[in-house]
Amino acid sequence: MIYTFQDMLEMSLGTRKESDIETIKDLLYGCVSVVATDNNGNDEGIDFIATLRPGTEVFIDVKTRAEGCSKYWKNGEPELAIETWSVIKGGRYKTPKYRAKPGWTYDESKKTDMVLYTFAETDTDKVYLLPFQSLRLAAINNYHNWIATHKVDIQTSDNWQSQAIFVPSKVVVQAILDTFENVTVK
């Protein structure tokens, strides 16, 4: 698939912005305000800052799937994009500017607290607000299984290529729950 980064950013900051703000307020108990950051595609993983009643800030990264993605879903269940590579090593574009870079799901440098997955209303009315660190651990723990059993796709965006695994939402949520249950004390 070919996307331009600017088109996806404009959709995220434009048509989805207000509905994302309302969704976050509805899902995050105690939320008194949500503001969009002005980072325009930064690498920190912060699209919105939600503030809770005592003033605690929650950093939220939003992942919006393009309209029509549901035609690829098995059994009508939403799939969540788990980005393995933000820039693929040895991909189509081999300029020094675009060196291999881990996908946002695996990136330990992200300041993200939560990830909000949204979809076009024509695909589903479901949304998912997930804890980032638990999602990251679930993705690490299940990488080999997920890449072998679910759709892997390469997206071309402007001058680089990225890679994601598209995992059914129930599988992702269960994997997150498993990160809490499968801890051993050393």
Image: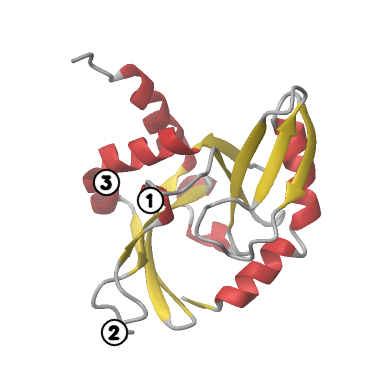
Residue at left offset 44%, top offset 83%: 159
Disc 3 crowd, CA 10 A, few/some/many (<14, 14-19, 20+): some
* Circle nearer the N terminus (3, 2): 2
> Which quarter of the image is occupied by the C terminus?
top left
Amino acid type, label 1: Asp
Quadrant position of residue 122 = bottom right
The amino acid beneath tag 3 is Tyr
In depth, the one of 119 and 34 nearer the eye is: 34
Residue labelled with disc 3:
143
Q: Would you say 94 lies left or right of 83 here? A: left
Q: Residues within 10 Å of mark 1 (few under 14, many from 20)?
A: some
Q: Callout 3: helix, strand or loop?
A: helix
Can I make out residue 60 in this image? yes
Disc 2 from disc 1: Cα separation: 21 Å
In front of the other: label 3 or label 2?
A: 2
Please tell me the numbered disc located at residue 94. Answer: 2
